[in-house]
Amino acid sequence: MASSLAGYRFYIPCESGLLKPFLNESDRRMLSIQKSCNCEIRLTQEARLKRGQKVRAVIVTGLDKNSLESCLRRLDDTFPRFYACANLQSAKSALKIVELKRYLTDEDLVIDKPSTPITYYQLAFNLDRSDIPSYEIWREGSDASLIKKLGCTIVVSSKDTPGTGFLRRYALITGENKKAVIHSYDILRSTFTNLPEYTGDG
């Protein structure tokens, strides 16, 4: 299956001393970190306000999360004021979140008849950005067709989730049958094995 790079985003204040390593393309410290960790480190052009402070995002990309974590730790060792690892643990926890919720809605199934209450279930999780090319191929295959036959729908965000952390896409599996929704997620996990297991009630 196709693949792309994993990524991690963190922010640094727009201060000349912090921006300097990025503005100097021949900075030996930055080049050394990228080479040893087999990662790319880049500073985004757009500045934004975060908690009243002007900041710019730093995007680190690599082959896998181990490479990213190694790169982040090297950055903090070399540039302590980056605080690249400050949210690393919470970022790891965010990847493990799998939530199943029950919803009740009224739908007009027949014209001129009272609305019918419909119960449906929604399982929310995060799909790693590096898995998106493979997912685009997978969604045209037999497993995706099987999920449709179970009466379930998968929706994946077209954009990465904002903020600090691993680059990922918010995703939902929706259906009227609770067990079918959970089974659909298990089908997806059979291909994307890095997805966390759903451990809630079946």
Image (tube, rainbow, N blue to C red):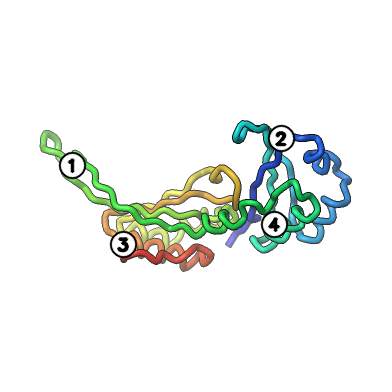
Label 3 to label 4: alpha-carbon separation: 35 Å
Q: Quadrant of residue 72?
A: bottom right
| Kind of residue at disc 3 | Ala
Residue on which disc 2 sits: 45
| 4 or 1: mark nearer the eye | 4
Residue on which disc 3 sits: 180
Q: Is residue 152 visible?
A: yes
Label 1 to label 2: alpha-carbon separation: 50 Å
Relative placement, left or right, of 82 versus 167 is right
The tag earlier along the polypeptide, 4 or 2, is 2
Residue on which disc 1 sits: 109
Q: What residue appears at the point 21 percent right and 41 percent down from the top-left corner?
A: 107
Answer few, some or many: residues within 10 Å of disc 3's Cα (few below 14, many 20 plus, some between 14 and 19).
many
Where is residue 109? Give x, y as percent: 18, 42
Q: What residue appears at the point 76 percent right and 59 percent down from the top-left corner?
A: 38
Q: What residue appears at the point 56 percent right and 54 percent down from the top-left corner?
A: 90
SS assignment at label 2: strand
Which quadrant holds the N terminus?
bottom right
Q: What residue appears at the point 68 percent right and 46 percent down from the top-left corner?
A: 59
Task: Reply above or below: 16 against 156.
Answer: above
Label 4 to label 2: alpha-carbon separation: 20 Å
| Kind of residue at disc 2 | Gln
Answer few, some or many: residues within 10 Å of disc 2's Cα (few below 14, many 20 plus, some between 14 and 19).
few
SS assignment at label 3: helix
The tag earlier along the polypeptide, 4 or 1, is 4
The tag earlier along the polypeptide, 3 or 1, is 1
| Kind of residue at disc 4 | Gly
Residue on which disc 4 sits: 62
Q: Is residue 133 visible?
A: no
SS assignment at label 4: strand
Where is residue 113? Give x, y as percent: 11, 37
The tag earlier along the polypeptide, 1 or 2, is 2
